[in-house]
């Protein structure tokens, strides 16, 4: 367990890039969502919902790790860059969540 804590310590910038990658994947599902949901059926919507929840959870975990790193004396410049990257990573799941709410409200 201490090995995992050592890996997580001071690696917010790396984790923010991972969150950005997953955010881009979730953002890619937004394009032509209604058409793809109609063609591929409920499986596409279910996978999109799972991806949206997982993306949000990963972004929240990265933000929590960033807050812990800030209290431990992580470089302020790196914290700023990591927070901007995580903010950009949240655009994908947020857009996908808006599409899912629109789909389920019909």
Image (cartoon, helix red, strand yellow):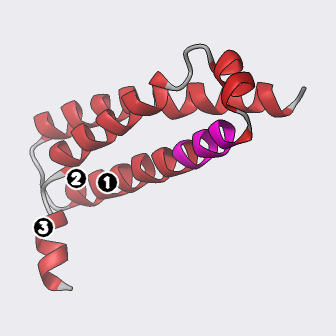
Residue tagged by mark 1?
A: 67
Label 1 neighbourhood size at 10 Å, few (<14), some (14-19), many (20+)?
A: some
Give the CA separation, mark 1 to mark 3: 16 Å
Q: What SS does tag 2 mark?
A: helix
Q: Secondary structure at mark 1?
A: helix
Camera-side mark, 2 or 3: 3
Q: Nearer the viewer, residue 37 or 101?
A: 37
Range drawn in magenta: 43-51
Occupied quadrant, residue 23: top left
Image-based side of 97 in relation to 64, left or right: right
> Do tag 1 and tag 2 residues touch (Cβ < 8 Å)?
yes
| Residue at screen point 9% across, 44% down | 75
Judged by its main secondary structure, the magenta piece is helix
- Where is mark 3, residue-wise? 7
Q: Residue at left 30%, top 28%?
A: 84
| Cα–Cα gap, marks 2 and 3 | 16 Å
- In the depicted view, which residue is nearer to us: 84 or 49? 49
**Looking at the rendering, which quadrant does residue 17 occupy?**
top left
Identify the residue shown where x is 48% and y is 53%.
Answer: 57
Q: Is residue 27 magenta?
A: no
Name which of mark 1 and mark 3 comes first in the sequence: 3
Q: What residue would you read off at disc 2?
A: 70
Q: Residues within 10 Å of mark 3 (few under 14, many from 20)?
A: few
Residue 39 in the image: x percent, y percent?
A: 69, 23
Point out the residue furthest to the front here. 39
Q: Which image quarter holds the N terminus? A: bottom left
| Residue 106 drawn above or below residue 53 | above
N-terminal label among 2 and 3: 3
Question: Gap between marks 1 and 2, in whole Å?
Answer: 5 Å
């Amino acid at each position: 367990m201490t090995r995992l804590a050592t890996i997580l310590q001071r690696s917010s910038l790396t984790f923010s890039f991972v969150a950005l990658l997953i955010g881009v994947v979730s953002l890619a599902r937004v394009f032509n969502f209604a058409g793809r949901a109609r063609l591929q059926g409920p499986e596409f919507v279910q996978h999109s919902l799972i991806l949206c929840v997982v993306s949000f959870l990963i972004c929240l975990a990265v933000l929590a790790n960033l807050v812990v790193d800030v209290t431990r004396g992580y470089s302020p410049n790196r914290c700023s860059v990591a927070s901007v990257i995580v903010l950009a990573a949240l655009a994908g799941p947020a857009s996908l969540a808006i599409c899912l709410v629109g789909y389920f409200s019909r």
